[in-house]
Image (cartoon, rainbow, N blue to C red):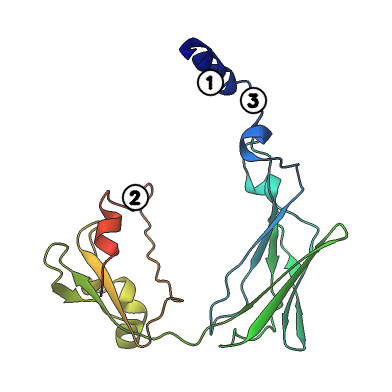
Amino acid sequence: MRYVFIILCLIACAAERQPGELFGSVEEGSELVVDGVLIVDRPLPELFVRRILPPGQTYSRDAAGVPDAQVRVFQGDQVFEYASDPAPGRYLPPPEAPLVQTTTEYRLEVEVEGKTVRASTTTPERMRVQQMVLLDEDTQEIVRTLKSFAEVGDEVYTAPENQLTHLEGLIEIHLEKAGEAYQAALFTLEEDAQLLDEDFIEIYVRTP
C-alpha cells in the first residue's frame, strides 16, 4: 500500500506542467495594471499603463507597456487628460494641472480597446515629521538626530548628520500625528543592497 501511495505522489508532482497550470490562467493582454502615486502638495504624477504578461514570457517594460490608452484623472468637476509619452505605457499629466490637495477624492479612468478601468482614492491629511533619529540597535538609545528640510533645505542630502552606514543602527521617525495609515519608506542608491536582516521582524515589530 505504501508503494502505491508513493507512485501517486510522483504522478501528482509531475514536472510536465504548463506555466498557466502553476500560476493560474493568464492570457496575453487580458489584464491591465495602472501604476501611479499621488503625493499631497506635489503635481499630479506620471502614470504607467501596462499589461500582465504570461508566466512563460520574459518581462520587459516595452513589451508590457500600453501605448494607445486614454487616461483621465478627475478631481471634483475637473478632468485632466493625460498625454502619451514616447516611452511605452508612460502617460504625462497636463502642464496646467494643480497640486494634489489634502482630503480630496481623485478618480482614475483608463480606456483601452473599448475596455475601461476605473479606480478612486482619497488623499490623507498632511503628515508632518517632527524628528528623525538614529538609534543604537542594541540599546535603542538615540545616537544622533538627523537634519530635516525645514532646517537645512536641500542640504539634507549632504549634511554629515544624514550620512548613514547601511545596516548600522535603526532609523526612528517621530510624527506629529501617528496612525496606521502612514507608511515611511527609505531608499538607497546602492545596487543589490541587502535590505533586510534575518532578524528584521524581531527588530521592527515592537511596541513604541
User: Which label lies toward us, 1 or 2?
Assistant: 1
Determine which residue is flagged by label 3. 17
Residue type at the position of mark 1: Cys
**Spatial CA span between label 3 and label 1:** 15 Å
| Res 176 → quadrant | bottom left
81 vs 53, nearest the viewer:
53
The structure residue drawn at horizontal position 66% and vertical position 33%, both measured from the top left corner, is 21
- Left or right relative to 81: residue 143: left
Residue 193 disc label: 2
- Mark nearest the camera among 3 and 1 is 1
Residue at x 49%, y 10% (from the top left corner): 3
**From where the camera sits, is residue 56 visible?**
no
Residue positioned 37% across, 46% down in the render:
192
- Of label 3 and label 2, which has the lower sequence position? 3
The CA span between labels 3 and 2 is 35 Å
Which residue is disc 1 drawn over? 9
The alpha-carbon separation of the residues under discs 1 and 2 comes to: 40 Å
